Amino acid sequence: MPAESDNGPSFRIGLIGTGYIGTTVGGEFYRHSEATVAALSDIDETARAEAGDLFSVPADSQYSDYLEMLDAEQLDAVLVGTPHTLHYEQINEALDRGLHVLCDKPLTTDAAEARDLVDRIEGGDQTLMIGYQRHLNPSFVSARERWKESDRTPRWISAEVTQNWIRRFEGTWRLNPGLNGGGYLWDTGSHLLDAVLWTSGLTPTAVSADMDFVDDDQRVDSRARLTIRFEEGATATVSTFGDAPCTREHIHMWDDDGAVYLEGREWEPRELVTVDEESTEHRPYVDYRTRQTKADAFVEAVRTGEEPPATVRDGLRVTAVTEAAYEAARSGDWEPVELE
C-alpha cells in the first residue's frame, strides 16, 4: 500500500522510460490527486531532463539506470514504458522489490515469460496492470457486456487496423525486432488482438497467418492476415496494415441475434453500433464522462486489492496469440496457442 505523508496518502510512482508512454501516462499520475511522480529513469539524458521538468522531479531523482532508481527511491509502483522486449526483466525487477507495476502493452514478447508472470502475480498480492486502454473504453466495455450478461456467444469476428506505421517510425526502435519483438502486429496490432480477445471473452486455441515482411530476416511485418480458432467454435479474421496513409479501425462481432460494430478513425473514441436480426442498426448511448484514466484504474486496483481492468492473464492471451501468429506465418501451418 502507498505510504502516508505529512499531507495525507501519497502514491509514489517511478517512471521506467520517459518516451510517449512515460510522458502521457506519467502525466495522468502527475495530475492524480493521490499520486506523485517521485522519480524517473531513461537512458537518454535529454529525455530525462525534459521529463524531470515536466513532472517537477528533482535532478537527484532522475536516473540513467532504472535499477539504481529502484534501489535508491522509496516507491509504491512503477510505470514501464520501454521497448517491448525489455518489459519482462523490468517487471520482475520491480516485483522483486515489492512494487506494483503498470506496464505498457504488450506484457512480453515471449509466451513462456508471460506464463511465468501469470503464475507469479496470481499467486501473490501485487498488482500488475497492462496498458490496454480499450478495457477502460465505454464502447468496448458495453460490447463485452452483451456476451457476459446473456447466453449469447460470438460466432464470427472480423477486425482490421491501418496506420502509416512504417513511414512514421522508420529509424526508431519500433522497427528494430530486437526491441519491438517483431513488426506492426507486435505494436499497434497488439491493441487490435486484445480488443478481439477481451471484448469477445473467447478462448483462442490455434492460429494460421501470412505476413508481408520488410526485412530480409522476416521479422518486421508491415501486413499480417490471421485466422484464429476458438474453443467455443467461433473464428476470427484479423488484418493489420502498417503502410497505409491513415489510421482506421473496424471490429465486427456476430452472434445468433445480430452483431456489434466498433469503428473509428485515428485515435478518436470508437463508435459502438449494434445490428439486429433484421439488419437494422442501433447506436446506443455511450457515456464517456465516466471513463477512467489508466492511472485512475491502477491506483484504485492497488488500493482495493481488486483485479485491474487489464490483467496479466489478458496480457498472456495476446502474447500467446501473437507469438503463434509469427510462427504460423513462417511455417505455413496452423500453430497452437499455448495459454498454460
Image: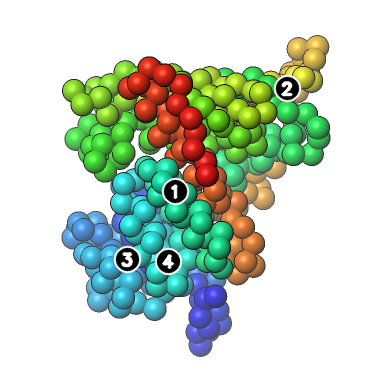
Q: Choose the circle earlier in sequence order: 1 or 3.
A: 3
* Residue at image location 51% in from the left, 20% down from the top: 227
Kind of residue sitting beneath label 1:
Ala
For numbered disc 3, what is the local secondary structure? strand
> Which residue in the protein does label 3 denote?
40
Q: Report the mark closest to the observer, 1 or 3.
A: 1
The local crowd at label 1, few if under 14, some if 14 to 19, many if 20 or more residues have their Cα within 10 Å, is many
| Residue position for label 4 | 95
Where in the figure is residue 234, as x and y percent of width and height?
Answer: 64, 23
Residue 38 percent location from the top left of the image? 38, 72
In primary-sequence order, the first of circles 1 and 4 is 4
Q: Give the mark nearest the N terminus, 2 or 1.
A: 1
Labelled disc at residue 255:
2
Instruction: Please say whether residue 136 is visible from this viewpoint.
Output: yes
Helix, strand or loop for disc 2: strand
- The reply to whether dot 4 and dot 2 touch (C-beta < 8 Å) is no
Residue 28 in the figure: left or right of residue 41: right
C-alpha span from label 1 to label 3: 25 Å
Which comes before the other along the chain, label 3 or label 2?
Answer: 3
Q: Earlier in the sequence, mark 3 or mark 4?
A: 3
Residue 189, located in which quarter of the rendered image? top left
Q: Is residue 210 left or right of residue 159?
A: left
Q: Marks 1 and 2: in contact by CB < 8 Å?
A: no
Image position, residue 160 (x, y; %): 49, 22
**Mark closer to the chain start, 4 or 2:** 4
With respect to residue 142, does 239 lie above or below? above
